[in-house]
């Protein structure tokens, strides 16, 4: 298991899926609004963060830089993604804890 520090604030496994998301955003940047191809990757990033215990203030801050949305929109997007993904993979108690964060 890799260590998290200031240079690498996320677990190595999470950083790998974040890089995939970043590449997908760059490829789909011309498409305004929702890009359906980003949703499964975003879901994978958010759920991986929850499973690895990396769901904290760093994740929404990173999403703000990647998506260039306002904080309200990013928070709503992440919470909606957690809720939809939690129905099948995250125990309900853990999902509720993340939604309150």
Image: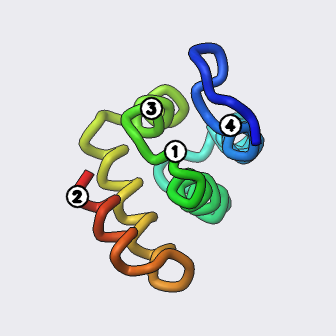
Q: Secondary structure at mark 2?
A: helix
Query: In the image, what residue occupies the spot 53% across and 85% down?
Result: 88
Q: Nearer the viewer, residue 77 or 5?
A: 5
Q: Residue furthest top?
A: 7
Q: Is residue 70 left or right of residue 6?
A: left
Looking at the image, is mark 1 or mark 3 nearer the viewer? Answer: 1
Q: Which residue is mark 1?
A: 54
Mark 4 or 1 closer to N-term?
4
Q: Secondary structure at mark 3?
A: helix
Query: In the image, what residue occupies the spot 66% across and 38% down?
Result: 11
Mark 3 or 4 closer to N-term?
4
Q: Is residue 53 left or right of residue 13?
A: left
Q: Which residue is mark 4?
A: 22
- Pinpoint residue 28: horizontal percent, then vertical percent: 68, 44
Tell whether label 2 touches label 3 (CB within 8 Å): no
Q: Rounded to the nearest whole Å, what is the CA distance between mark 4 and mark 2? A: 26 Å
Q: Which residue is mark 2?
A: 100
- Pinpoint residue 97: horizontal percent, then vertical percent: 30, 63
Q: Rounded to the nearest whole Å, what is the CA distance between mark 2 and mark 1? A: 15 Å
Q: Which residue is mark 3?
A: 58
Q: Nearer the viewer, residue 24 or 16?
A: 16
Q: Rounded to the nearest whole Å, what is the CA distance between mark 1 and mark 3? A: 8 Å
Q: Secondary structure at mark 4?
A: helix
Tell whether label 3 touches label 1 (CB within 8 Å): yes
Looking at the image, is mark 4 or mark 1 nearer the viewer? Answer: 1
């Amino acid at each position: 298991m890799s260590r998290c520090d200031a240079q690498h604030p996320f677990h190595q496994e999470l950083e790998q899926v974040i890089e995939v998301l970043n590449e997908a955003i760059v490829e789909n940047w011309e498409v305004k609004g929702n890009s359906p191809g980003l949703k499964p990757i975003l879901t994978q990033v958010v759920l991986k963060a929850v499973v690895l215990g990396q769901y904290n203030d760093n994740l929404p801050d990173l999403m703000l830089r990647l998506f260039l949305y306002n904080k309200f929109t990013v928070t709503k997007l992440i919470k909606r993604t957690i809720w939809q993904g939690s129905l099948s993979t995250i125990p309900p108690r853990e999902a509720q804890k993340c939604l309150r964060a």
